[in-house]
Image (cartoon, rainbow, N blue to C red):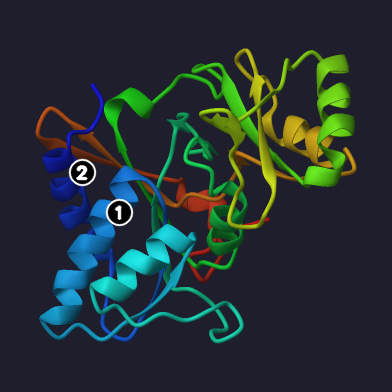
Amino acid sequence: MSLTDSDAAALAAHALAYVHPGQVIGLGSGQAATAFVHVLGRAVQAGLRTTAVPTSEATANLARQLGIPLASLEDVPAIDVTVDGADEVDPRLDLIKGYGGALVREKIVAAASRRLVILVGRDKLVPVLGSRGKLPVEVVPFAVGFCRRRLVEAGYAPVVRKNGTAPVVTDNANLILDCAVSPIADATQLDGKLRSIPGVVGTGLFVGMAHTVLAWDEGRVTTMARPASQLDEDGGLSS
């Protein structure tokens, strides 16, 4: 079942345990991430010292309204922990993100983070990435026709994402092509293949980036962690 707003709020409250005073926090986008911003805002109002780096203009605006101090990636050397959602999570904790449209900024913030905590409902847990049949790909507007033809040739049936009749424009002033996919055998290989197309800015494949996934399932939180063998000495993901 999908998360209700109350489920998302409970899950977000659980995620606050990963935040410590004085840390820099990455703020994701989407339902679960928005719930976490509200939880963090209340903690800040209660005296928690923190600085946040948002992954979208919508998240930034909400954080400002809640009194959360913001910074850019130019202002901080690293992000201690990022809390975000996902559209698919496989058993290895690899992800598909971007149904909400902020995939490239989300990936940049995730890459700058020492820890990435993902909040999802059980409906987002899949046996293999691609199970929901859609992979977002962000492209520069100048290249959309070229990228679409290349993706058609590769068998991915891309569709320009629209809001009504107008194309959706990302915070980076780019467009999103939603590609039809079947279960993905090698997500790393596919990510590299798609990013090699000139004009593709990034894909919704987040491989080897999540450290922890908190999944809401019928009133309980299940915690899934990436194996310690895949983490370096500082707790980050090994290359």
Residue 211 image point, x, y percent: 45, 52
Q: Is residue 237 visible?
A: no
- Residue 224 rendering spot, x and y as whole percentages: 34, 41
Q: Residue at x 20, y 79 (%)?
A: 44
Q: Is residue 39 visible?
A: yes
> What secondary structure is marked by label 2?
helix
Q: Nearer the viewer, residue 163 or 103?
A: 163
Task: Inspect the image, locate mark 2, and give the three-letter code of the amino acid beneath it.
Answer: Ala
Question: Mark 2 — residue?
Answer: 8
Within 10 Å of the Cα at label 2, are there few (<14), some (14-19), or many (20+) other Cα atoms?
many
**Is 210 in front, or is 38?**
38
2 on left or right of 150:
left
Residue, disc 1: 34
Q: Where residue 162 sits: x, y (%)? A: 57, 31
Mark 1 and mark 2: Cα distance apart in space: 9 Å
Residue under the image location 9 percent in, 34 percent down: 219
Asked if residue 2 is positioned above or below residue 144 in the image, the reply reads: above
Q: Nearer the viewer, residue 13 or 188?
A: 13
Q: Quadrant of residue 191?
A: top right
Q: Is residue 115 above or below residue 117?
A: below
Q: Looking at the picture, how far across and down is residue 26, in whole percent? A: 43, 66
Which quadrant would the C terminus be assigned to in this image?
Answer: bottom right
- Which is nearer the N-term, disc 1 or disc 2? 2
Front-most of residues 96 and 162 = 162
Instruction: Name the image quarter holding the N terminus.
Output: top left
Tell me which corner region of the image, top left, top right, bottom left or bottom right, holds residue 194.
top right
Specify whether 202 is left or right of 120.
right
Answer whether labels 1 and 2 touch (C-beta < 8 Å).
Answer: yes
The answer to whether 103 appears left or right of 60 in the picture is right
Q: Residues within 10 Å of mark 1 (few under 14, many from 20)?
A: many
Assign a secondary structure to mark 1: helix
Q: Amino acid at mark 1?
A: Thr
